Amino acid sequence: VKTRTDLFEAVAELIEDIVGVPHSAIDEHTMPDDVDGWDSLRHLTLITAMEERFDIVLSPEEQSDMLSVELILDILADRLLVN
Amino acid sequence: VDADDRTARKARARDAAERGDRAEVVAAFNDLLKVSGDSATYAFLDRLAVSAGRRLDLPARRLTLVASFTVGPLVPFLRTEFFQLGWQVEVEVEAYGGWSEYLLGATPDATDVMVMLHADDVLPALSGAFLTSPERVLVEVDSFVDLLAGAVRVFRERTSSAVHVATLATDRRELERNFAHDPVRNRRLMVDQLNLDLAAELGRIPAVTVYPFDALVSDHGRERFFDRSKADTLQAPIRSTAYPVLARDLAHYLDNAWAPRRKVVALDLDGTLWGGVLGEDGVEGIELGHDGRGKGFRDFQLFLADLRATGVLLALVSKNDVELVRAAFEEHEAMGLAWSDFAAVSIGWGDKVAGLEAVALELGLGASSFVFVDDSPVECEFVRSQLPDVAVVEVPKQIDELPRQLLASSRLEPSHLSEDDLVRNEQYTTERHRREERSRFRDHDEYLRSLGLEVGVMSASLAQVPRLAQLAGKTNQFNTTTIRYDEAELDALVADPATTVAVITVTDRFGSYGVSGLLVTRLIETSLVLECLLLSCRVLGRRVEHAVIDLLSAHASALGADRLTVLYRVSERNGQVADLLPKLGFQPAMTPNLSPEDFAAWERPTVLVDSGARELMSVTTDLAVYG
């Protein structure tokens, strides 16, 4: 993963797998509440899946800040992308 | 992992799930899991598994997970594994915390339940400053065992569903190694003791089994199994990377509990029970010994001896010279099994399918009771294609892996050992002796007379009801109406003065067959109506059914009835009853109103008909009969 676009693609794939919405229905502004089936259990699974896929451990603060795709990407970019 | 490769495998899994048969879907799933087994992959497969399970109409089950922690994330893993084993399971989750309230408040429509409690959740004293007052933990352990066993007992009284209870484990292990062998200062030892107490309490409740969760945790390692930070922040103590391991183990356990247990392992010889070729290498030349690869084969034989001790029958199906094989078992010093350990043997130069069929016929068991083990991929494929109900296990390159592979794919493990399991091998060995004896007689009746059969037909007592319900639940071949009486129904019938419930026992000079049958009669006007007669297949072919029917005629006449009426309901397996009735002089009844719609009634007069079978054996009864 080298760019924010790569990151978006990877996260969108995870959301597609876990929540069951097509990749095309997701963009940076998507929030869990906008998507049918993106409930708290699936959100928890998504956080776990990101930790597994990117081999990181997210702190409780980071986890609770992940309230939209944009915020998820901000946090992951901080951790994974070299500026 | 290459993302494009994963995408391609996902597409193939989706394709297979939409169109393929089960084997194709399972293969495509495993193909994806080989490169990616994380939470997202399982979430993806779970969705496919649910729709494919429905499309393929797999046998359905319902299960409620009752846990002391957040167990929801396990569900996609679990449903995926269930699908791989051939089930579609609707899984519900009871929110963490309220486990005892859930069990105590159960309603009759409750599903089967899997109870998963984490020691660190349910034993606060154990997870707190434990060493300051270990005695507090002992008190806590006792009251926890009482609470859980009591709640399970209430659940079982109110529902007809099964309960599976996981043993407990603790992830608290600081300072523990300093007290490795101190039973009151070591948390793990205390939890071990708790698990023993719990299993003893739960073992007394019917339809309750114990899932050895702690054994899985210790196999895997606590460090890798648990995740302390997730336990603290999300009440999810199991590390996400351990979910696949737990789901596979738990699904496998429940599969063994739900599916009928397979009863026979049919084994090839060369390359399976030893290395090399007996016919070429000779008895001393085969690969079997106390080190190297030969030890792998010996260990496999010893494993089979253990499996046999749990009630599994062993059989040989091999292309070989039978005398040479016998010599090998008798003379080779490193054999782990003896010639007499095999309940049936088919050794010759015919094909394996014919060999398996011969063994099945000899043991009186169907193909779905069999597991076949062979090192030849060709033979395995041949058996798979001809006998799809037989589970086929191919010997792996690493012989040490064979025991685990055999258990993983073949439903041989008992969730608990029944009395039947413990005596099965003895019964089949005795049966082998009887068969050998039978071949000495030309006339079947003469053979029966030589057996010294003793048949008892005695009124049932309430204490016998559980055994009778078991018999009613599983007897298929000789069963006139296949009514699956449960314990409550049998209790009521035994107590009802208008009906007679009798137990049939059979003994011969080789030994007892135990409780072998059940009959239920009711006098209606001038007819004695036989609502159900069933006999275990172990006693068939001995004219016991003839003698029992003749005895009932005599009983009917003593009660003043002029007819004996046998109700018959056809099932897939009880055709022999339909063949028997006309042979014994029964005719379709003139008074069909005696029976429910799907039952046929057959009758014969109580006088002047007798098969003569009672002269071949001694019949004892406490039912009223003249003379």
Image: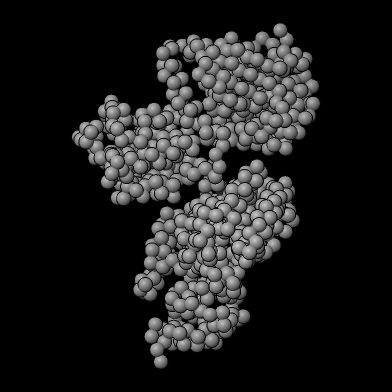
Quadrant where the N terminus of chain B lies? bottom left
Residue nearest the viewer, comparing B370 with A45: A45
| Residue B254 shows up from this direction | yes
Image point 66% across, 25% down: which residue?
A: B503
Image point 63% across, 59% down: which residue?
A: B134
Q: How far across and how far down the image is residue B574, in percent?
A: 57, 31
Depicted B371 relative to depicted B243: above or below: above
Q: How far across and how far down the image is residue B603, in percent?
A: 68, 21
Image point 40% across, 30% down: which residue?
A: B341
Residue nearest the viewer, comparing B141 with B624: B141
Residue B123: image quadrant is: bottom right
User: Given the current orientation, which residue lies at the most extreme top position?
Assistant: B627
Question: So how many labels did they put on this image?
Answer: 0
Depicted A7 relative to depicted B289: above or below: below
Q: How far across and how far down the image is residue B553, in percent?
A: 68, 16
Answer with left or right where residue B89 lies relative to residue B383. right
Residue nearest the viewer, comparing B184 with B527: B184
Image point 72% across, 37% down: which residue?
A: B488
User: Given the current orientation, which residue lies at the most extreme bottom position?
Assistant: A83
Answer with left or right where residue B379 lies relative to residue B85. left
Residue A30: image quadrant is: bottom right
Answer with left or right where residue B387 lies relative to residue B200. left
User: Given the current orientation, which residue lies at the most extreme left position?
Assistant: B280
| Residue B80 shows up from this direction | no
What colour scheme was applied to this rendering of the protein?
Answer: one colour
Q: How far across and how far down the image is residue A18, in percent?
A: 52, 72
Depicted B167 relative to depicted B231: above or below: above
